Image (cartoon, coloured by chain):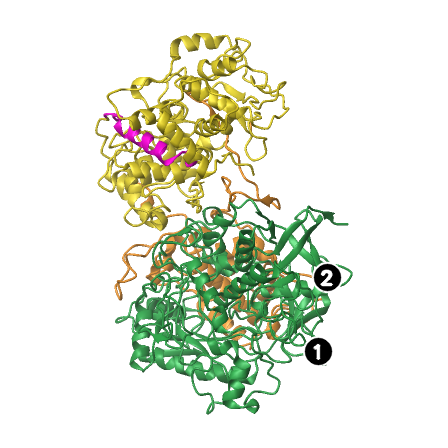
Chain colours: A yellow, B orange, C green
Amino acid sequence: MRKAAIPAILVCAAAAWLGSAGFGDAANPDAQAFDQIEKGRYLTTVADCFACHTVPNVGKPFAGGRPIETPFGIITSSNITPDADTGIGAWSDEQFDDAVRKGVRPDGSRLYPAMPYPAYTKMTRDDVLAIRAYMATVEPVHQPVKSNTLPFPFNIREAMRAWDALYFTEGEFQPDSRQSAAWNRGAYLVQGPGHCTACHTPKSFLGGDKTSENLRGFNLQGWFAPDITGGRKQGLGQWSEADIVGYLKSGHNKFTAAIGPMTEEIVNSTSQYSDSDLSAMATYLKSLSGRQDATSAQPASAVMTAGQAIYRDQCSACHGLDGKGVPLLFPSLAQSSLAHAGDPASAIRLVLRGGRSVATRSEPTGPGMPSFDWQLNDDQVAAVLTYIRNAWQTAAAPVSADMVGKARDGLRTRSD
Amino acid sequence: MMMQRRDFLAGTAILVLSTMNSRATVISGALPWAPNAGNPPVPVRPGPWHYFTSDEGRAVEALADRIIPPDPQTPGGKDSGCAVFIDRQLAGPYGRSDGHYTQPPFMPGTRQQGAQSANGPAATYREALAALDRYCLSKYQGKRFPDLSDQDKDELLKSLEDEKTKLEGVDGKSFFELVIKDVQEGFFADPLYGGNRDMVAWKMIGYPGARYNYLDWVDRHNERFPLPPVSIIGRADWSPKN
Amino acid sequence: MPRKLPKKDVVIVGLGWTGSIMANALTDEGLDVIAIERGPWRDAPTEFPPSYSQDELRYRIRHELFLRPEQTTFTFRNKMNQTALPIRDWGSFMPPNGVGGGGVHWNAETFRFLPSDFVVKTHLTERYGASFLPEDMTIQDFGVTYDDLEPHYDAFEYLCGTSGTAGNLRGRIQEGGNPFEGPRSRPYPNPAQKQPFSHTLFAKAARDLGYKPFPQPSGNMSQAYTNPLGVRLGPCTYCGFCEWFGCGNYSKASPQTTILPFLIRKPNFSFRDNSEVLHINVDGSGKHATGVTFVDTGGVEWEQPADLVILSAYTMFNVQLLLHSKIGTPYDPVANTGVVGRNFTHQTISSVNGFFDNKKFNFNPFIASGAIGMCIDEFNGDNFDHGPHGFVGGGYMGQVQTGARPIQTTHVPPGTPTWGAAWKDAVRDNYLSTVTPGTGVHGSFYSYRDVYLDLDPTYRDRFGRPLMRMTIDFHDNEIKQNAFLTDKFAEIIRAMGAHTLDKHYRKGPYDSTDYQTTHLNGGAIMGTDPSTSVLNRYLQSWDVPNLFVTGASAFPQNAGYNPTGTVAALAFWAAAAIRGQYLKNPGPLVHA
């Protein structure tokens, strides 16, 4: 199994280089230089090109061909190995940069924002060229890929011109001189190569970022990518920096475990970030203000009673009689932002479907949650989740049986 | 895995997660997990017999009510569903002796060598209930086992147990022992299997059922555990009462 | 013609405890290792979650996690002059199947053998004289000592997070532990589990009678634990659905909860499930294994070549595979020649149920774990003078009740009818106030000339190969041992305050329908003499040096303890020998 892993020592070297030089060397970088390529390898991991551009488990790295769900249909990732015919080997640096930071292909056609160029646009040119330098050393794979597998009329790339006009603001990240170097580094990573906004920022109905609600959570395909601002109720306000770093590095911290699409992100990407970069991101995220939610409705006492019975009889087996779980093994529901999120989609999904949390080198256990869809009906799932969200000096909006029913229907055809 | 999923927003990439399949394949890299893996139980639904004829069902209900007679506090074997339990079990793998070694030759052995018959429990019940029927019809002037008085039923069962009465063609004693075992299993098994209706047996003995966490009670010695029993398919308190 | 797969450095047959231990050790050596498991992959969140694992009918009565006799079984007879008949449904033991093997459904009782157990022949002969031992008793020394294995016992206990109280720390006896145990180099990794009411009461009664009760060493976590591989386990919640069941909340030590998450990440490890090994292949010389042949669920045969073969299937399947692969000379009990199949043993189990006044005693017996319990060891091994008693061996005894699942734990006082109103009333009145230890007396089973394994002449498996035949009965020695122990045990139960006792002595003939633990041992025993053993002291085959056979099949006789701790320690010991000696210089490690 090929891993896009970076030996620790090289990560440290890259981080040291990056730390000292700021966001990239202004001088002309030599694409053949070892340090340029290592910087590029690290940034490729940060930007997680591997995840989308490789078919999981069986595909050759970066050779594309991975089907990606969008609300408009399936699009297929392209081959970005240095193969001249079927990959990007024949592209110039300028063309590579235009693709990554402007969403434009060499023939002038537009990329779809399945490729997160609205985030990558914030990257510096030097960082992009470093990525290019690394990608040029990757094994070339001759594999033609038809990317545009979207159905009509979405396969008309020209339409992206209009979308870009509405939602795409080209331009590098501008550091805020009032903030620390760490904050700026964190902001750069989160907004730029880390492209966290792609999943965690709410979107308009046409799929553009609602920038005023940056990183306050977003529902995509049956999961709710949570609020990762510093908001106390819904976001990471109760997590220390160390908690955030631990989560991104190992997939687990004393509150919770990564599950769902984030597990892949952690395995391929954040678990390999340098510790200083993870700290920087934590600094940035915790500085963001969370949403000001209205106080949620009081749950009905009949619902709480039923939920408590289910909780005691079932959930307490792992999550404990006090809701605090077992650190680094079973999430603390009492303190879990996933359980208390405004949009309970992830919580509903987990109860119905179960899942396996992430296994990383530092946290290999990867414990799993069983599914309860066969055992609990919609009223019961709603009751136990409402209980969990309101039991331990916490409060979050009740979950309705209707929400559960819709989620159950939606899950029927999913394979993940 | 290509899926056309209509969803609301997102100009973002939604990655289709892969699943792992562990049927005689090579597993490496990560431990397998797939959604809907495992086999949650399928609860028995009330309704017509799946295996018994109506006469057989009546006879087994009558047997169940003698093995576990009703009393004011707790229903008997019939009302608690033991015959339903046995019926559904006989209609399934237990009845067929699925998984047993059934290759010949079948030779009688010592008691220590265990059952050596080609007959599974389902066939045994059919044969033995027929033999019991024939015996009752002949001895009790046209009455079947369920029609006898309780006293007559108990006397007959005791004499089968003592081997003072023999049934034709079947071992009455070992059949009765089989029925005792099955009735009592049905009585104490999880209600999802058709017996122990409403957990009456568990309530009778004070068994809290399919619970998993007693950490707050390990150190509480000699105190009555207060929570009601719960089945694998839940209890009434799980549903909000309006 | 089997299809040939690319060669591996090591092929391991069976991915249970010892298969996992060996795989982890040998991959650390940089070897390319594949394990081949007959049964399916199983894990808590999918196959035994805490939402439906609490199903006594399914998992205990219908034994769903276990092997189906239809897939493989054995024939059984008590004596050589009888005809063996197939065990058509399991009774006296229940073989595992699937990844994790017995480690998934075991109780997790994690004992060490006594130092004297490893040199029992020498020890007993010295103390009592050779004529004190029955003439047909074939006990042998193991070839390793307790001191050899101590670091490996320690490694297993720390891998598992075993919960216990040390009794002997580097020679100093510790209050509250087992004063008879061999010296251990450090305490248990976790404190002993808390004991429920009846277990605590047993300890008090035992103490009042002058014994030294100690908590049973338990592989159910007394608290959350992270083992040396970085794998985490949660605290046991006393659900009472332990043995026969998989643990739903990661609190019972098993290969899945202690080794496999770490092992699977190694690029040089992989495994196949649902693949049954048919035989170990040996070259023309008969002295070198070339790999194994296995069949998948489609019936297709494959050959997995390898330089080193580790046979880590359960006791019975180890011996069966050696017989089918024609490795080693089969044992002939009449001529008393040969080795494969000799010294086959089980365990001598009995119990005493105690009935108490339900107005004074409420035991909440359903609150329990698989390996809680308070035990005494005064009557184990040679811990007491056997001179006056006319038998050798012994066992621990204790209130080791693991739960009170109602189908099996609704006992009534002796004399109560087994059905009817009187039965029902007695069940109602006694459920909460009965002590049902289960394997309350856990005695040794020494080896005899006429207790052995070989191939059956009549019955075949689904591949047409002969079934293995068990010839096994109790001998007077074990019957006497058990009577003595059971009476001692009954005294303690009485002293707890029981008004009525129900003693179940172990009596012959050995009954294949009556469950008495799955601690089958021997048949491929270790030793110092190739004419009376299959393996040398490193579990290496005398005949085929690149074959090692782990498991309780190596025990020349069984001691008065659960075998898994010793099985695992021997596996760690063999792995160390392979890493430290064999790999540097492949070949026989012992020249007899």
Q: Amino acid at mark 2?
A: Arg
In the foreground, B82 or A194: A194
C570 with respect to A85 (left or right): left
x and y percent of residue C158 in the render?
A: 42, 60
Give the Cα distance between marks 2 and 1: 24 Å
Chain on which label 2 sits:
C
x and y percent of residue C331 in the render?
A: 69, 74
- Asked whether residue A283 is drawn in magenta, I would say yes
Residue A386: image quadrant is top left
Circle 2 — which element?
A: loop
Q: Amino acid at mark 1?
A: Thr
- Marks counted in the figure total 2
**Residue found at x 39% / y 28%:** A18
x and y percent of residue C58 in the render?
A: 49, 56
- Residue marked by disc 2: C465
Work out whether C403 lies above or below C82. above
Q: Are circles 2 and 1 on residues that touch, CB within 8 Å? A: no
Question: What secondary structure predominates along the stretch shown in magenta?
Answer: helix
Q: Is residue B212 visible?
A: no
Q: Is residue C459 visible?
A: yes
Chain on which label 1 sits:
C
Please give the label number shown on residue B108.
none
- Asked whether residue A331 is drawn in magenta, I would say no
Q: Which residues are magenta?
A: A270-292
- Image quarter in which the N terminus of chain A is found: top right
- Residue marked by disc 1: C337
